Each structure stands twice: as structure tokens, then as C-alpha cells.
Amino acid sequence: MATIIDGKASADKILENIKQKVSELEKSRDRKPGLSVILVGEDSASSVYVKNKEKKANYVGFNSSVYKLPETTTKDELLALIEKLNKDDAVDGILLQLPLPKHLNPSDFLDKIDPKKDVDGFHPVNSGRLLNNEKPYAVPCTPKGIIRLLEEYNIQIEGKNAVVIGRSNIVGKPVSMLLLNKNATVTVAHSKTKNLSEITKKADILISATGHAGMVTADMVKKGAAVIDVGIIRGNDGKLRGDADFDTVKDIAGAITPVPGGVGPMTIAMLITNTLELYMLR
Ligand code: NAP
């Protein structure tokens, strides 16, 4: 049976350390790290994510604020808020919660956030730096959390075959780049990939970020592989599931992240880590 990678325990440890650091920093600096989150509209999943982010930011002692804007917010209004936060010296990290309402295009806003306050690492300066293997101001939170988990569990990356299922800008592409920068041999699969299981069976590290519950089955996994399940899908029974069929895959894999309690908590811990790192830059 696989080692269960406990993302919740790792995330709690990271948050505890940051909380300690913030209380020490308060003695030497005149202000706390500041995180501003912008939520536009009424998406219920986004509201839950934002509430969790605010809770953890408050827990570690950050100065956090959430800007809840109505569904009808215009492009100019959102740009004006981003501009105001860019200029605010008390703000170290700005997070624009996605998805936005349909009339607003994320790419009109993500590159307007100051790259040095771009806590999600989505600004083209930061994604470009990641691509060039130069240090970005911030690395996207979920991919960064995945690498942290692999490292914490001593799962070797260099020289290993890594297969990433999914090529989104938030997960698939940046995690592929991080793995490549750490000298893995990386294959990126997506919905048009043929013979997926032949590819995944060669993976020493298999990362799945599709949002299709249970699509990674035991017969797709190499014995002893590390399986990192990014998917979060709420079933009709209200329970959260991942991309992997956990109960069967855990008998083949060498290590596996559960859903919930795997990658999810690490994503928020990395958001808090990124905010602190941006604060330290200034
Ligand atoms: P996304 O933008 O919808 O991307 C999904 C990717 O999966 C696409 O690249 C798609 O291929 C690929 N895909 C879909 N069906 C496939 C199939 N049958 N075979 C192979 N590839 C397939 O999703 P995302 O934002 O990356 O999120 C993915 C999942 O991770 C969701 O469940 C999301 O909720 C979860 N998530 C979790 C966290 C966390 O903190 N744990 C963070 C972010 C996201 P195409 O490009 O060809 O369409």
C-alpha cells in the first residue's frame, strides 16, 4: 500500500512556521505582510476558496482584506481597484480570484497586477521567468505546493519520468515547467492525447489535473509511482473526490495524495508563503 502524502499536515507545519516568523517580524518592521483578495461576482466555490484564504491569512497574522465586487463590475472599475492596490504600500500580494464573470476577460487584468505583488504568479513576467528558469517573484501556488510535497516526501525528481495530465495555465503548464527545471523528463497529456494509459504507465511521477473524478485508474499507474492528484470534484453525494480512483490506485502507487487533504491545503499554504516572500522583497 502506498504512502499517503499528508498535505494537510505539511500545510499546517508551513503555516505554523510563518505565523512564528510574522510575530518576530513585527518586532523589527513597522508593518505586517498584507494580502488583498479580489472576488468579483457570486460564484459559490470561489466564495468558499476566498473565505479559506482569508482565514489562513488572518491565522498567520497578515493584514488581509477581501474586496467583494458585484457581478456587474465593469472592466474600468476592476482596473481602477488593481491600480489602487498596486500603489498601496501596505499591500504585498494581490490575488484576483478566478473565474471572473463572463463579461470580464482574465487576461485584461492579470498583467495589470504589479509583478512584484502578483501572489499567484500569473503575470507574464512571472510565467516568462519560470519558462526561462529564472527566479519568478512568485510561482503559481498549486504547482509550487506539489513540488514542496514531492521534496518533503523525498521523492526524487531529477532524471525521473514525470507525466502531467492537464495543460491549464494554473496547474498543468507551470507544474510541467517546474519539473523540467528540476531535471525530470516531462510529458504533458491533455484531452486530445492518444493512448493515455500507455504514457501514464511510464510515469515515475504522475500528476493529474483534469477535474474528472476517478479517471486515473490502477491499470494506468506504474508500480511504485508517486501519484499527485490535483483534481477536486464534488459528487452528487456532496463528497469531494479527485481525478484518481484512490481506493485501487493506492495499492499500486508508491505514494499518493488523498482528496481532500492532499494538494488543496498546500495551495493555500503556498499563497501565504508567496505573500511573505513578496513582503520580504520590499
Ligand atoms: P482546466 O483548466 O479545466 O484544465 C483541465 C485539463 O485537463 C485540460 O488541459 C484538459 O485538456 C485536460 N483534460 C480534460 N479531460 C481530459 C482527459 N479525459 N484526458 C486527458 N486530459 C484531459 O482545469 P484546472 O484549472 O487545471 O483544474 C483541474 C482540476 O484541478 C479541477 O478539478 C480543479 O478544481 C482542480 N484544482 C485543484 C487545485 C488544488 O488546490 N487542489 C487548484 C487548482 C485546480 P484540454 O486542454 O485539451 O482541454
Image (cartoon, rainbow, N blue to C red):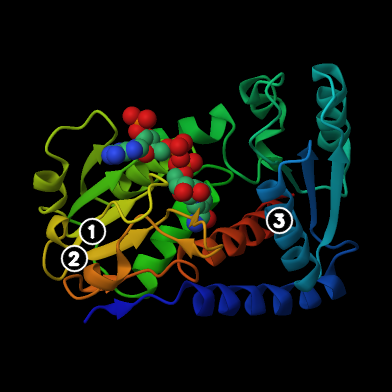
Q: Which mark is residue 145?
A: none
Q: Using the rendered image of the protein, determine whether residue 263 is visible from the camera's viewpoint.
A: yes
Q: Is residue 205 left or right of residue 71?
A: left
Residue 192 place in picture, x, y as percent: 24, 28
Residue 205's disc number: 1
Q: Nearer the viewer, residue 109 or 138?
A: 109
Q: Distance between the Cα atoms at labels 2 and 3? A: 32 Å
Percent coordinates x, y for residue 37 in the rendering: 77, 46
CB of mark 1 within 8 Å of CB of mark 2?
yes
Q: Which residue is mark 2?
A: 225
Q: Nearest the camera: 238 or 195?
A: 238
Which residue lies under the disc numbered 3? Answer: 48
Helix or strand or loop: what does disc 2 sit on?
Answer: loop
Query: What SS does tag 3 mark?
Result: helix
**Residue 157: quadrant of the picture:** bottom left
Please rate how many residues cluster around mark 1, counting C-alpha atoms within 10 Å: few if below 14, some from 14 to 19, many from 20. many
As drawn, 80 above or below 229: above
- The vertical placement of 228 against 72, above or below, is below
Tag 3: residue type? Val
Left or right of 104: which side holds 243?
A: left
Q: Is mark 2 within 8 Å of ligand 1?
A: no
Counting residues from the start of the chain, the first of labels 1 and 2 encountered is: 1
For the residues bearing labels 1 and 3, Cβ distance under 8 angstroms:
no
Q: Quadrant of ligand 1?
A: top left
Residue visible at 18% across and 65% down?
A: 225
Query: In the rendered structure, which disc, 2 or 3, sits on the residue that comes first in sequence?
Result: 3
Above/below status of 17 relative to 276: below
Give the Cα distance between marks 1 and 3.
30 Å
Residue located at (11% from left, 54% from top): 201
Q: Nearer the viewer, mark 2 or mark 3?
A: 3
Q: Residues within 10 Å of mark 2 (few under 14, many from 20)?
A: many
